[in-house]
Image (tube, coloured by chain):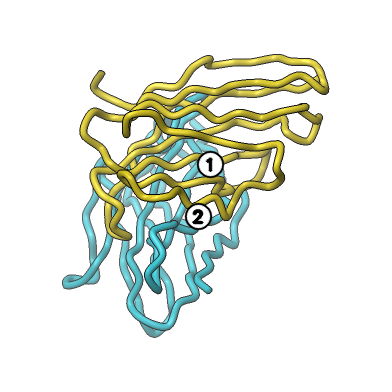
Amino acid sequence: AQSVTQPDIHITVSEGASLELRCNYSYGATPYLFWYVQSPGQGLQLLLKYFSGDTLVQGIKGFEAEFKRSQSSFNLRKPSVHWSDAAEYFCAVGGTGGSYIPTFGRGTSLIVHP
Amino acid sequence: GAGVSQSPSNKVTEKGKDVELRCDPISGHTALYWYRQSLGQGLEFLIYFQGNSAPDKSGLPSDRFSAERTGGSVSTLTIQRTQQEDSAVYLCASSSGGLANNEQFFGPGTRLTVL
């Protein structure tokens, strides 16, 4: 069965600092990988996704993520964080093994200090 | 509409009452998902609809939970005899197909509080 681990429950950064949110997955083959962001009181919005090809994926709002097969990781990065980036971030693995049900991590809450 | 909509946005009910939560997916999207998000938790899958196929109900936590999707569009999640542990945000998502690599578009959720 597929699984997703986001080891950090909370991350605090200063505005303008760089950011890396960790995501590790468990699945035998190359999975479909997603990062979503959830602002307070809103639903989830897709930041970026990886299916195949270039392992460095660019997304919206200046985010990028790198797929590393050897580490089973798909970490999200941003070179300079803005206060508006404060939100909950979810990593997800697309349905695998014939399933169409994605698996979401528990989320990482990003706090941005001015 | 342009996105997924859910109603009501907030629902407060008494223990033991039934509630209905509504989801309007993006027009033309064949796949529809319901999730439950409890405080500090990730998204818990509840049920999945794809076109005219039988829904995948494997995530429903008890027989008090049910959902239907009429005409391949609007979906209603029903919780009977609500319990306090049912308090959560219920999210609906739709996608253009039932493939594992399809992006999901989420509604803003319904916050359910059971007193």
The quarter of the picture where residue A69 lies is bottom left
Q: Judge whether residue A11 can be spotted in this image.
A: no
Vertical placement of residue A17 versus B23, above or below:
below
Residue with the mark numbered 1: B35
Which residue appears at 33% of the width and 38% of the height? B105
Per the image, the residue denoted by label 2 is: A104
Q: Height in image: A60 above or below A42?
A: below
Callout 2 touching callout 1 (CB < 8 Å): yes
The x, y position of residue A105, in whole percent, is 53, 56
Q: Residue at the spot x=82%, y=22% of the render?
A: B15
Residue type indicated by callout 1: Tyr
Q: Colour of chain B?
A: yellow
Q: Mark 2 — on which chain does it sit?
A: A
How crowded pointer 1 is (Cα within 10 Å; few <14, some 14-19, many 20+) is rated as many
Which amino acid does the dot numbered 2 rest on? Phe
Left/right of residue B115 with respect to residue B19 in the rendered view: right
Give the image location of residue A42, x and y in percent.
Answer: 46, 27
> In the rendered picture of this protein, how many numbered marks are placed on residues?
2
In the image, is A15 to the left or to the right of A9? left
Along the horizontal axis of the image, is A75 left or right of A107?
Answer: left
Q: Are marks 2 and 1 on the same chain?
A: no
* Residue B41 locus on image (x, y percent): 64, 46
**Chain that the image shows in cyan:** A
Estimate the spatial distance between the alpha carbons at disc 2 and disc 1, rounded to whole Å.
10 Å
Report the side of A76 relative to A60 (left or right).
right
Q: Quadrant of the C terminus of chain B?
A: top right
Quarter of the image for residue A49 reads bottom left
Q: Is residue B4 above or below residue A92?
A: above
The chain ID associated with circle 1 is B
- Name the residue at 17% across, 71% down: A54
At numbered mark 2, what does the secondary structure look like: helix, strand or loop?
strand
Crowd class of label 2 (few under 14; some 14 to 19; many from 20; radius 10 Å): many
